[in-house]
Amino acid sequence: VEYHFELRDKVMVSYMELRNLSEDNFLVIQKLRRSYEDRLEGILKAGQESEVFRFEDVRVTTMALLAMLSGYITWYQSGGRLDKDDIKRIHWDLARAMVGA
């Protein structure tokens, strides 16, 4: 969440411009994305196997967490009802709830 706060404009542009990449460059980005998706999925699997986390499907949980943690940049407005610390705290609580921690 902090990363997206600090680089919000760059993140927004990069998401929107993916469709304009050449196929080769898109594949590079896709490989990088899959790498961090797999890393998070591994953490979730380990937590599930050790019974620290409880959820039904590891891939769905992985994608839901990533969507939640990056998607707020489309709706968050500085100076609104909640400040950055509120958003970070709420996301932390939601992420823990999603994995049953």
Image (tube, grey):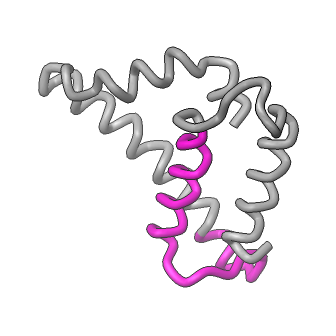
Rendered view: 28 above or below 39: above
- Which quarter of the figure is the C terminus placed in? bottom right
- Which quarter of the figure is the N terminus placed in? top right
Q: In the image, is residue 14 part of the stretch drawn in magenta?
A: no
Q: Is residue 44 left or right of residue 41?
A: right
Camera-side residue of 59 and 8:
8
- Residue 21: which quarter of the image? top left
- Residue 50: which quarter of the image? bottom right
Camera-side residue of 34 and 94:
94
Q: Is residue 28 left or right of residue 20?
A: right
Q: Is residue 55 left or right of residue 90?
A: left
- Residue occupying the point 41% across, 39% down: 33
- Residue occupying the point 30% across, 37% down: 30
The magenta stretch is 45-72
- Residue occupying the point 45% across, 67% down: 59
Rendered view: 81 above or below 54: above
x and y, in percent, of residue 20 in the image: 19, 20
